[in-house]
Image: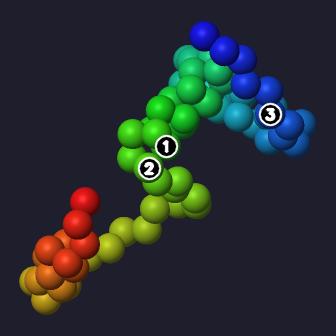
């Protein structure tokens, strides 16, 4: 195991610790989980996800893009 030290705003830490407590988990668990999600997905989610309604035309475009971009 190793230790990660980060500098964050005091207010943000307090708010995050309170929210973690509401969920019944330590703040360390929240941070570890965020890092694991980042490594697994190779993505960073910033902000609230928005709801997107996908109709047939949009789905066809998404399928076409998916075929063009190798994973």
Task: Give the secondary structure at mark 3.
Answer: loop
Is any atom of residue 35 visible in this view?
yes
Disc 3 residue crowd, few under 14, some 14–19, many 20+, Cα 10 Å: few
The percent position of residue 57, horizontal first and vertical second, equals 13, 89
Is any atom of residue 22 visible in this view?
no
Mark found first going from the N terminus, 3 or 1: 3
Task: Give the secondary structure at mark 2.
Answer: loop
How many numbered marks appear?
Answer: 3
Q: Are the two marked residues, 1 and 2, in contact with CB atoms closer than 8 angstroms?
A: yes
Q: Which mark is residue 42?
A: 2
Report which residue position mark 1 lands on: 38
The N terminus is located in which quarter? top right
Query: For the point 43% across and 68% down, which residue is it?
Result: 50
The percent position of residue 47, horizontal first and vertical second, equals 58, 60
Report which residue position mark 3 lands on: 6
Query: For the point 32% across and 73% down, which residue is it?
Result: 52
Disc 1 residue crowd, few under 14, some 14–19, many 20+, Cα 10 Å: few
């Amino acid at each position: 195991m190793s230790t990660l030290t980060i500098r964050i705003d005091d207010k943000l830490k307090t708010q995050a610790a309170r929210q973690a407590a509401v969920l019944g988990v330590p703040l360390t668990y929240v941070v570890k989980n965020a890092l694991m999600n980042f490594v697994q997905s190779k993505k960073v989610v910033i902000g609230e996800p928005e709801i997107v309604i996908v109709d047939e035309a949009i789905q066809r475009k998404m399928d076409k893009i998916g075929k063009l971009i190798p994973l």
